[in-house]
Amino acid sequence: MRRRRPVRLLLAAAVLGLSSTALGAGPAQAAGETTLTADPLGTWQTDGIVWALAYARGVVYAGGTFEHIRPPGAAVGTGELRRKNFAAFDAVTGEPLPCAPEFTGGVETVRALKASPDGSLLYIGGSFGSAGGEGRSNTASLNTEDCTIGSDWKPVVSSTVRAIDVTDDAVYIGGQFTTVQGQTRERVAALAPDGTLLPFNVTVRGSSISNDPIPGINAITVAPHLNKVIIGGRFTSINGSLLNSVHGLVGLDATTGRIVNHFTGWIPRKSAVKSLVNDGTNFYLGAEGTGGGVFDGRAAGRLADGAMLWKDTCLGATQAVVPYRGVLYSGSHAHNCGDTPGGFPEHRNRQHLLAQSISDETILPWFPDTNDGIGEQIGPRAMVMADGILWTGGEFTTVNEKPQQGLTRFAAEPDTGAPQVPLMSGATGARGKIELSWKASWDRDDGVLTYRLYRDGVFLTSIEQDSRYWDRPMMGYTDTVEPGATHRYSLEVTDGTNLSGRNGPVYVTAGS
């Protein structure tokens, strides 16, 4: 079912002593969005970190810092195929494809991937000196039809490329570089598809992160119909702007680099933007901060005028965001979303994958999870939607508490995970009454669950309850039977698709 719904308490007179407050009023109303399932599809794994994902013409490309890929469920070293920092997969089946140019030299890592609008070219950025055996300087292109390294695209970039976005006429790159094609370009540049440097010229100065004093660009999203490019990263001044008028996020004229949106106050001190994407109408970002008073969550804004639509309050740095059918999916290590609608308080677990209503930021009941993993132990690092399947890459080594490294996928179906049936207890009540109680269960991709109660093996009633893993209210039912009679009761739970096993039986004698 996987639908965000308000709490519906169908207990009527059957519940004694439990108010709607005690049962949990649930999060704010959202727009009824349907999420993907939380059950991962079988996915090939990497033996390192996936930093970037892109989709083009039925293929998903993964870039990062790894040496091999291996089959779903396989242990490290089992069934491995050589893939040096780059791999290609069928977007639907997930099977690896033979397209496997190696990216070597430099730090030997791929950090950014983006396909051209027609999908014929894949632009690749990172820190490398060779792409498929061809000399390249931190960026390259790939012909997606035959998996050959593009011969026209070979700009000389002085340092790491961390972000790419592409239009029909230009390729925008961002990172830590200071020169491109021998000319000054501070952390962001635009080039024609043949590698010619375009007039777009931006001066990026200052770092918003005290322990990383070098400014940098982590994310770029372009709106060609508005001639606008939005860049995000760690910086405090653009084109000589006054201190604090620009911080970590800015909208620029896509031709000249002139500031068109300052986004003043969006990104506080000690925070930086890590991801940006737009859907043609709105743009969405994820941020990361260090220390107290930072912004670690997600925000949505209007492309046309730069107005903020919403900004959540979650802690736990956000590395990737993807909008899809009214839902914003994100990768982070969220651990305190208590002031965001539908959110959870601070608790011992980090939640690495989230879904939010684009209409009102409500956190929806979609809770697949990874671990922190290796490297910087952040968890997910990259996301892309491909033919209705959400591909997620990063540093993680488990998904839903099972071994799975570097890559995972989620689709609209099949939904295979049944909620766990809770333990039920019974007690003798007043004359002719039997009191039953249990703690609500929870499900990774359904907020409202249905509890089916049986007396002596025959269906008695059903009760619906909204619950989350951090908020499982007590539930109860009062049965009326013959005074002094003994009956057996059992309980099962369904999410509308999957049915748990039936618990019990519990034998209880009515009051006499």
Image (tube, rainbow, N blue to C red):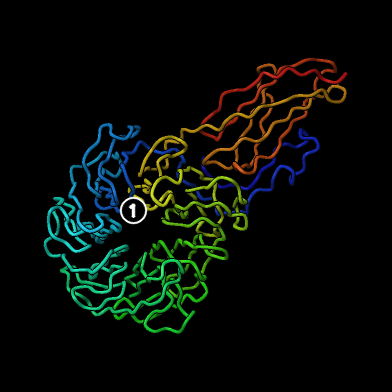
Callout 1: few (<14), some (14-19), or many (20+) C-alpha neighbours within 10 Å? Answer: many
The answer to whether residue 282 of the structure is visible from this angle is no
The answer to whether residue 71 of the structure is visible from this angle is yes
Residue at (39, 46) in percent of width and height: 374
Instruction: Please identify the residue farthest to the front as the structure is shown.
Output: 211
Asked whether, in this view, residue 394 is left or right of residue 433, the answer is left
**Which percent across, then down, holds residue 257?**
32, 79
Residue at (17, 73) in percent of width and height: 196
Residue at (20, 71) in percent of width and height: 192
Q: Residue type at mark 1?
A: Trp
Residue at (29, 50) in percent of width and height: 65
Q: Nearer the viewer, residue 167 or 191?
A: 191
In the picture shown, does residue 377 fall above or below 482? below
Asked whether, in this view, residue 368 is left or right of residue 463, the answer is left
Where, by quadrant of the figure, is residue 208 drawn? bottom left
In the picture shown, does residue 205 fall above or below 468? below
**Which percent across, then down, holds residue 35?**
48, 46
Q: How many marks?
A: 1
**Which percent across, then down, holds residue 430?**
87, 25
Q: Nearer the viewer, residue 283 or 136?
A: 136
- The image quadrant where one finds the C terminus is top right
Where, by quadrant of the figure, is residue 402 drawn? top left
**Which percent across, then down, holds residue 341?**
60, 56
Asked whether, in this view, residue 97 is left or right of residue 371, the answer is left
- Disc 1: which residue: 51
Asked whether, in this view, residue 448 is left or right of residue 58, the answer is right
Element marked by disc 1: strand
Q: Nearer the viewer, residue 350 or 354?
A: 350
